[in-house]
Image (cartoon, grey):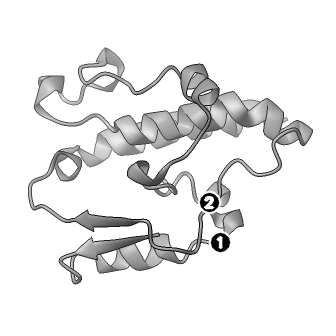
Amino acid sequence: RFRRIPEDSTVRYTKWYNGLSPEQLELQQYREVTLVQPSWFLERSQFEKVGGYAIVGDEEFRDDGKDANTFGLCEDLKFFYGFLDVTEKEYRSGELKRRLHMVPQTLLTYRFVQGSMSSQTPRKVLLRLRLRAFERRVLSKWP
């Protein structure tokens, strides 16, 4: 959970995020990142399996010929999907009881800043990334 400063910024997102149930952390993964990055806790071995965070400038996510270094490229979303990918087998086998969990306490205060890197990420880049994850994680396994 998090608290937003100023309180009236991103009200819908804050309410949605803070209201997620444990099941929704998995189910709503294609809508938005369901774990706010600064509040993640995970084993170092899992972080290393994912390969860390993506580097700005990754050719795969350039958009409309713009220089990729001029905007953030969803490092949190790419890491989130990478984490879900590398823990899939352990989770399905029951070795991992729950891979996503949210504690009831507010752990983070987020300051909303107009013009931040995340607000400058083109929507098409986010949608492409979500679509690729959906294709890889769901459609490729569909009979």
Q: Is residue 65 visible?
A: no
**Are dots 1 and 2 in contact, CB under 8 Å?**
yes
Q: Residue at x 49, y 57 (%)?
A: 31
When the figure is inspected, residue 43 is found, relative to residue 11, above or below; the finding is above
Q: Name which residue lies at 52% across and 74% down.
A: 105
Tag 2 secondary structure: helix
Q: State the image coordinates of residue 69 (x, y, percent, origin top left).
A: 14, 25
**Label of residue 21 in the image:** 1
Q: CA distance from mark 1 to mark 2?
A: 7 Å
137 with respect to 79 (left or right) = right
Residue 49: give x, y in percent of width and height: 61, 21
Residue farthest top in this picture: 59
**Left or right: residue 72 compared with residue 114:** right
95 shown above or below 24: above
Indicate the amino acid at tag 1.
Ser
| Side of 62 relative to 137 (left or right) | left
- Binning the other alpha carbons within 10 Å of mark 1 as few (below 14), some (14 to 19) or many (20 upward) gives few
In the rendered image of this protein, does residue 114 appear above or below residue 119? below
Looking at the picture, which amino acid does disc 2 mark? Answer: Leu
Vertical relation: 63 (above or below) 24? above
**Residue at (85, 40) in percent of width and height:** 92
The residue indicated by pointer 2 is: 25
Whether residue 17 is visible, yes or no, is: yes
The quadrant where residue 81 appears: top right
Pick whichever, 100 or 103, lies toward us.
103
Q: How many marks?
A: 2
Where, quadrant-wise, is the C terminus in this rendering?
top right
Where is residue 126, by image quadrant? top left
For this orientation, the residue located farthest to the bottom is 8
